[in-house]
Amino acid sequence: MGGVPQTSLTSPLVGREDELARLTGVLERARAGEARAVLVAGDAGVGKTRTLDEVAGRAAAAGTTVLTGHCVDLGDVGLPYLPFTEILGALAADERFAAVLAAHPVADRLLGGGPDDGGTADRSRLRLFEGVAALLTELADAAPLLLVLEDLHWADQSSRDLLRFLLSRGVLHRPAGGAPGHRLAVLASYRADDLHRRHPLRPLLAELVRLPSVERLELRPLPDADVARLVRSLRDRPLPDTTVHRIVERAEGNAFYAEELVAATDTPAVGVPSGLADVLLIRFEQLSETAQQVLRTAAVAGRRVGHDLLRDAVGLPEEELESALREAVERQLLVSGDGDTYSFRHALAREAVYADLLPGERARLHGGFARLLAGPDRRSDSAAERAHHYRESHDLPEALAASLEAADHAQRVGAPAEELRHVEAALDLWSAVDAAARPAGPDAVTLTLRASAAAAHAGEVHRAVSLTRSALAGLGQDADLELAARVRYTLAGNLLSVDNQSAAYAHSSEALGLIPAEPPSATWLWAAATHVMAARQVGENGTALSVARRALEVAQELGVTDARADLLISLTSLEGGNRSTPQGRERLLEARELARRAGNAPVELRALFNLAIGGFESGDLEECLTRASEGLDRARRSGLLSSPYPREMRYLRLLVQYTLGHWDECVRGSEEHSGTLPAWGGHTLGPGLYVALARGDAGAADRARALLKGPFDWMARLVGGIVLTDAAALRGDAADAVRSMRSTVEALSDDAGTPPLATVRLAALALSAVADTVVELRRTGDEAGAARWAETAAELVGQARASAGYGEDGTPQGPEGQAWLARAEAEWLRTTGSEPDPASWERTVAAFAFGDTYERARCRLRLAEALLAAGRREEAAAEAEAVRREADRLGATVLRDRLDDLSRRGRLTDAAPAGGAGAAVLTARERDVLRLLALGHSNRRIGEELFISAKTASVHVSNILAKLHAAGRTEAVAIAYRQGLIVPEAAPSD
């Protein structure tokens, strides 16, 4: 018996996997004869109806009869049994249920067409309840039944009484004697935020949840990640990340609010969309005038307000205030919190109330809060609030002073993003405040320079560059030389962070030229330290080395310990003994200690980053993990987690997890940061993309392309290039693989034309696809095409050799680079036309033993293929088994698919029978030959594919023709198609 038609689903259901699993379990138990009920609670808009619709849809698809009744808010006009009359009306309109309804006249009575039985009111009511229970149980006997009751908070008294009877004595009551129960489930929803203390549903809920067959399920707000998925799914074209994040922040897990905010993204208005504001203000308008005034005042205070501050701002006697607050709390508009505070239940409710204020009323209330917060007992951490209230009350001089005080407080507590916000707010106010009314001390250029430093510490590197350029433009002709130098070397440092090395070198040169080296000064010293880094990046190593040595002497002379530490880090790659050597590590540890003693967290983080990446380059992955974790802990304690070096250390930690084969841990780490990283930090999720690609995630390449959008980011370009090159190689597109590799190398080469160290990896990945193409072209006899691609392979292996031979300081790269070179050489050998060379792949497998488990497994698959071609089957089988174990452990489905294909072609495992009944006529090897025969392959090519001789392939073809009673190859293929022995397969393009 099918279900009664349900309402159509409008928005996609996102998240709620746990809740759906629990409700589905209840339905399964009900189908087995264990009647159950679930009371589903949740705030308005959180997704109760959408979740119940999903469950009802699944139940109907499984053959369950689904009946739905809705309670409606009719105010004081209560229509008795409204949800049940809706259910009976739907049954009466469906002829499939005519016989059941005819046997139960209670339906006519509820629908208004049946006579009264003439008994007392109580007796008549009991018979009505028993009749409804009997009708439902008969329906459940015919087919599993799901009863859905929505919005119980609006249920009339009669409906509540009937529900109490059904759940306590009726349909959920288990028959005596151990007989099977009714195949019925009841799902009833209600709004938790509507249940004030005296709501009539509260006592019924308290009674029902004590019943053994009744349970309660609360739908809590969706996690931010699920809201973001919902938001993106609601639009055909992608929304900007900033828009998505803002909607997620405002919706606070409420699906309906999120949908309304998405719908309003195309409108020019800001604030709460009008339709949503109307919904949010309905409950507010039901309050008394005094309670409304209290909420208006609280809305001006912000999301949360203390009792004493609210009392002083609203100016009501204590008793009146408490009465109004109690009313607002009972109506679920305010909630009480710790520390004698009150907050709006949802931020959008506060926004709606705030937007409803008149402009003059709003300014007056803001001014009152500002004066209260600026009283004699004011706290430094209230400066941000004071700045906000002064600004909204149009007292701009006080707003400017409070903004600077708030910035100072944020700097002291290690909150650079907040410091940036407050300094920028001060800059916005600067020109609007008379010079005489401005705080003494900073000027506009100094403030802008401070904002750029805060932006850099917060990881907003492009914003830092923009702010420093603004400071440079604000310098007058008679500007102080030290300030002019500071602006220029700060701009140079910020430009290095966005990989604009040439401009960085030009500005650092200007900064160094503005300040004389004698007498020594701290300004010249930091200008020199920045110039050393910039010169190193543009290949001016001689200049970098001479300036660094002189600056180190000045740092020791002046006792500027953190500058000395910064210079030691730079000298590590300039004087030999680079960061991957014991000597380099010793120097970096010294620099780290000096920076720690000086309290300069950014320089200490630079030292820790170099220690971490030095460990990676030397193959000491555990050392890399240790140093990266130390760096992230230091950044967390200093509020610099979003700054550039911690960002790279986060990437390094995930990369090591990926390399060591801890893929699930890597994916979890990537997911933890996926919703918090700004666009410029997206490359940090790169190792998660490597895992996704290896596990067959078709969207990995699209997410990699997204990294290439926006302002140039060196690391994002690298990660995106690696993923796109490998993705093209995996799908056999050699042209696209080479194109991705070349464009990535070109984009990442420095101003002197030096390619990135990752060139060897990119070349090896591209060579994999090129070698496959050359081998395939030779099989088909296209020697000219194979020769052209072999020339490309020779060019690529040359680039790989050059890259691996020239590391950070001109010496050859470490274990990782040499491993990728070994793979590039082995792939290149496949294009030369020589016999298969297992030795080259044995060397490659050994090279990756430093820790890269996935690449080692991929190379072992190539080794197995080479061993098969060389006739060393037992060794090939052993390698294939090792690859199988590693692929299964990692969940590397792409590698496992390729292994299965090789094992089938090489008969390294027993293949399972395929096809229809006639398939048993052919052996496993004959089925392999038949599949290639259908692709039009010659005996020679069949032999090459299956690692057998052409003569053996010919014998198999003859056996196939005989067994299928076919006169020729074409007829044999046609017979095989008719018998289902093979399915159509597209021939590969040459």
Image (spheres, rainbow, N blue to C red):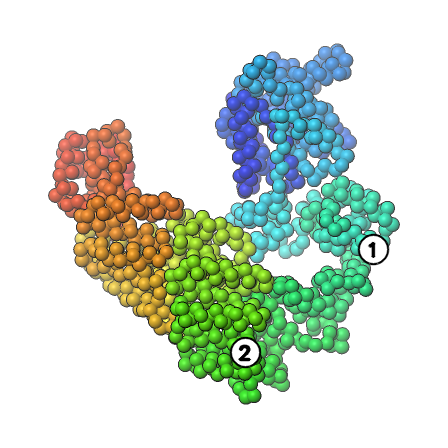
The residue lying at 53 percent from left, 39 percent from top is 17
801 displayed left or right of 221: left
Q: Quadrant of residue 455?
A: bottom right
Q: Secondary structure at mark 2?
A: helix
Q: Quadrant of residue 782?
A: bottom left
The correct choice, above or below, for 195 with respect to 788 in the image is above
Depth check: 300 or 659 in front?
659
The residue lying at 57 percent from left, 71 percent from top is 597
Q: Position of residue 720 (x, y in %)?
A: 42, 59
Q: Is residue 387 visible?
A: no
- Confirm or deny contact between disc 1 and disc 2 (CB under 8 A): no
Instruction: Identify the residue position indicated by label 2 in the image.
Output: 526
Q: Secondary structure at mark 1?
A: helix
Instruction: Identify the residue position indicated by label 1 in the image.
Output: 312
The correct choice, above or below, for 482 with respect to 697 in the image is below
The residue lying at 65 percent from left, 26 percent from top is 211
**Kind of residue at badge 1:** Asp
